[in-house]
Amino acid sequence: MPDEALLVVRGDELDVDLLRGDAENFHERFADWGRYGVSAFLARDDAEVDALCGTRLVRFETVVVFHRDALVAVGIEVVPTFRTPHVTLCHADVTELVDRLRSCEHEVRTNPYHEA
């Protein structure tokens, strides 16, 4: 994981049902790994958050921005997966993953590039 990546961005508003569903689907797909996970992206700064909003996250009306250190502090693993800047936010317990994500300090931003 690049050291300069300070932010982690996810499209949505941390909806409990969506997070749980995504995490359970991930667990089924990668059962041998023993983790529940949800997709996110790394960004170094607001310009990279903006670029992600206009490309990979355009389908989301809002995005959630976390500081990477805050996620780690609440016990969420931030694991590089697939192609950079993709990461998986994961934990061994699905309820803990959802609760920790929702309780972790974050900012919800409107995506100016959203396309319905």
Image (cartoon, grey):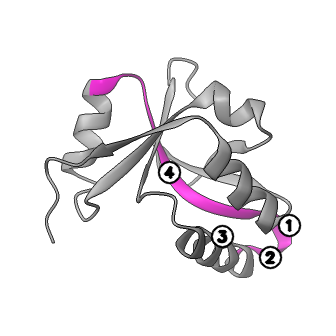
| CB-based contact (under 8 Å), mark 1 and mark 2 | yes
Residue drawn at point x = 58 percent, y = 76 percent: 17
The answer to which image quadrant residue 109 occupies is top left
**Chain-order first, disc 4 or disc 2:** 2
Q: Pick whichever of labels 3 and 1 is earlier in the sequence.
A: 3
**Residues at circles 3 and 2 in contact by the CB criterion of under 8 Å:** no
The residue identified by callout 3 is 23
Quadrant of image for the C terminus: bottom left
Residue 92, x across and y down, in percent: 85, 60
66 to 23, vertically: above or below: above
The tag earlier along the polypeptide, 3 or 2, is 3
Q: Hey, what amino acid is under mark 2?
A: Ala
Does residue 34 show up magenta in the picture?
A: yes
Cα separation, mark 3 vs mark 1, equals 12 Å
The residue positioned 62% from the left and 51% from the top of the image is 102
Pointer 3 and pointer 1: residues touching (CB < 8 Å)?
no
Which numbered disc, 4 or 3, marks the residue that appears first in the sequence? Answer: 3
Which segment is the magenta one? 30-46
Q: Nearer the viewer, mark 3 or mark 1?
A: 3
Q: Secondary structure at mark 3?
A: helix
Residue 57, image x and y in percent?
Answer: 30, 55
Q: Residue at x 30, y 25 (%)?
A: 46
Q: How far from the left and from the top, in percent, is residue 25?
A: 64, 79
With 93 as the anchor, is 108 left or right in this view? left
Is residue 52 highlighted in magenta?
A: no
Return the mark for residue 40.
4
**Residues under labels 4 and 1: Cα distance?**
19 Å
**Which residue in the structure is indicated by mark 2?**
31
Tell me how far mark 1 sits from mark 2, CA to CA.
Answer: 6 Å
Q: Amino acid at mark 3?
A: Ala
Helix, strand or loop at label 2? It is helix
**Rendered image: mark on residue 34:** 1
